[in-house]
Amino acid sequence: MASFEVENNDNNKKRKNKNVEKSKKKKKLPEVVEINEGVETEHEIKIKKTDPEKVKVIIDDSIDTSKTTEISEKVKPSKVRQLPTVTIAVPGSILDNAQSPEFRTYLAGQIARAACIYKIDEIVVFDDVGEQTNVMISNKKTEGGSKTCKQLAIILQYLECPQYLRRILFPIHNFLKYTGVLNPLDAPHHFRQEDNVPFREGVVSTLPPKKGKGCNVDVGLRKHVLVDKCLQPYVRVTVKLIPNSDESKRQKGIVVAPSTPKNESGIYWGYTVRNADSINEVFTKCPYPGGYDLKIGTSDKGVDIDQTDHTQLGSFKHALICFGGVHGLEAALEADQSIDEENPSTLFNVYLNTCPNQGSRTIRTEEAVFITLAELRSKMNL
């Protein structure tokens, strides 16, 4: 009997030891899970140092995958290099030489085609006539410059806009009466409905979304895209599409800057159009911070492009190429009362003659744009 009692005591001790070990293990678990009780522990410091996205995914397994994709796109910092930009400035008076409304429209289409072919980022339409000549009597100034400046700017904007957005953004206007005869730009951002692309241009729809859930945007697909921001209707935006999950049937997107497709994917995303009331406003109202760091003027009185030091043309952040009208940049300088200079070459870093030994007495501006951009293509890496 004594030996039996001793064995029972030994078994009881072993069971107690096992229960103690199990209780210790159970007590250790809350130390890892229950972290934040108002006191900063070592575990809490470690979590602060880790990536917030990874912590969220590890702790909460019940998060909807479609929502985490959208959140991660917003939170994830994108280090994107800013690619250089090229701007061309053309005078609105070039339409005054056109003999008919049809030819005016075609001339504007040539400027748009050249800008798209050579991937120009901005077109500035400036008034090089002012109120000093008799031409301005018939073309009385409006808030957008002279009548010809306004017409040129509207046609350029119309051609750059994707076809599925034109009917919404551009009402019927006399300036656009003959745009149907123009050659289409066929720019990279003019997508078809069946194209599977990461970015699209769109217009904010008038369809009311649910409260706190952004707004609907028409991007040329069968159904509108739901974006993350609440915007006013009829505003044109650039949308980055988010891949759909299996559970979500609704296409979602994020509103991004118009320069994002170019900087992220290297896709040429069209040009913007800006009006300037004088040649001085071409420089002073530059939309880029710091202004244009490379300013190029074109004239038959400039330096031969073949004899120019090409090293100064290859390095720039924001370049400007300025073209004159029928009477050259000298007439634009004379019409601008805010500039005291008489020689236009003083306004530019480089003053070039891009077509030396020309056979014709004059080169039309729409021809000069093609010639100049072709000559500078390899020198400026257009």
Image (cartoon, rainbow, N blue to C red):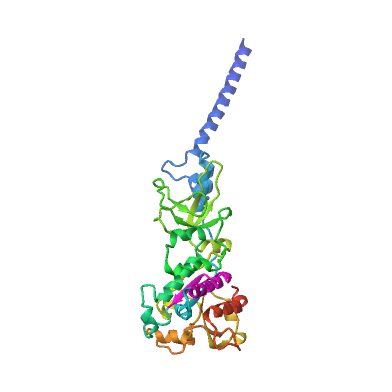
Residue 380 versus residue 122: which sits nearer the camera?
Answer: 122
Quadrant of the drawing holding the C terminus: bottom right
User: Where residue 355 appears, x then y in whole percent?
Assistant: 59, 84
Which quadrant of the structure image shows residue 368? bottom right
Does residue 291 lie above or below 260 as drawn?
below
Does residue 211 lie above or below 22 as drawn?
below
Residue that sits furthest to the top in the current view: 1
Can residue 151 be seen at all in this image of the molecule? yes
Residue 254 versus residue 299: which sits nearer the camera?
Answer: 299
Which span of residues is magenta-colored? 102-126
Residue 22 versus residue 349: which sits nearer the camera?
Answer: 349
**Across the whole image, how many numbered discs are drawn on residues?**
0
- Is 114 colored magenta in this rendering? yes
Q: Which residue lies at the image location 56% right of the left edge and 79% below the top edge?
A: 367
Magenta stretch, main secondary structure class: helix
User: Where residue 245 appears, x then y in whole percent?
Assistant: 55, 44
Can residue 86 be seen at all in this image of the molecule? no
Does residue 214 lie above or below 12 as drawn?
below
Residue 117 versus residue 172: which sits nearer the camera?
Answer: 172
